[in-house]
Image: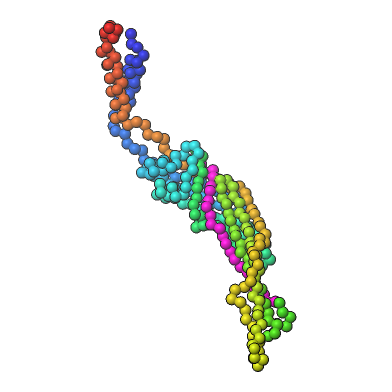
Amino acid sequence: MVNLPQKIAAITAGAVLGCLALEAKPAQAAEFYDYAEFGFELENYGGGYLFFEVTDDELSSITSILTGVGKEVVSLDELESATSYVDFVFDYEGIAFEYPYYRLGFHFKGDGSWTTNDVNNAIFNFDSGELIGLDLDLRTNITSGGFTEIGGCYYCDLYDPPTFYSSTITEYNNLLVKGDQFIQTVEPYWQNCKFEPTLNFPPDDEFLPYVTYPDEPTCDAPFLYSSDTVSGDINFTTYDPLELPPQSVPEPSTLASLSLLGLGLLVKKKNINPRQKRD
């Protein structure tokens, strides 16, 4: 009577030998060439896309960081190091584009736009090979402007010199892109300064008085003039998901080794006399 281990060994050996009969020639790596393409929009303010290619000789490097299975996070730097071609484009025009003439009454609105060149680092969130999230490290746009006016005197002559007043506006423009949300904040700070004259009288009455101005103005502390914010959703579109080939099956040589192991177990079992085993 054939026991269970003998049955398993026989089935294993037979199945493997059958595979070897069907696969007589050595296994060859299948040619592979795939690309992935994704788009994203930040409502009415901007958008962009991500595109990269994967060739057969890049499979080992790409699968170490991205497989297309489950939730995964990868950086733009990692993609560029693992694949031969990556194209990432980002563009955002924001408040300055939507409301170009609403800033402070004299069209001072700052930069308010970002492009790919402003991205210090990009992080992509994937789920089953589809892009679902985007994290961007973006620089702050800082823009300054201002004006100068004369005042502080009635006739503004030698004995009543003018005071020069200046106002400077420095606008800090920030954009946060995180996951599937974005938010832009604009904060302009207003600072008032003045150059006050000094009327100098010489000790000798034969000379006329003269006016001097300081090298640096006297300035008040900057104050926040206003704050504006826009925010919204990031909508993602997957044109071509990342679909890497499945993991490779064991080579025929490996299967042959398994088959010999199975046959060895079967022969060993047959050589044992049940009566000797009891003794």
Horizontal and vertical percent position of residue 186: 62, 58
Q: Residue furthest front?
A: 203
Front residue of 249 and 30: 249
Relative side of 246 to 174, left or right: left
Relative side of 71 to 277, left or right: right
Quadrant for the C terminus in the image: top left
Quadrant for the N terminus in the image: top left
Horizontal and vertical percent position of residue 107: 65, 66
Horizontal and vertical percent position of residue 87: 46, 51
Q: Residue furthest bottom?
A: 206
Relative side of 122 to 14, left or right: right
- In the image, is residue 67 above or below residue 5? below
Horizontal and vertical percent position of residue 160: 70, 82
Q: Is residue 33 visible?
A: no
Front residue of 120 and 47: 120
Residue 240 is one of the magenta-drawn residues: no
- In the image, is residue 245 above or below residue 89? above
Identify the image quadrant of residue 58: top left
Q: Please provide the residue range marked out in magenta.
A: 129-151
- In the image, is residue 26 above or below residue 205? above
Residue 141 is one of the magenta-drawn residues: yes
Residue at the spot x=47%, y=45% of the render?
Answer: 74
Residue at the spot x=63%, y=51% of the render?
Answer: 231
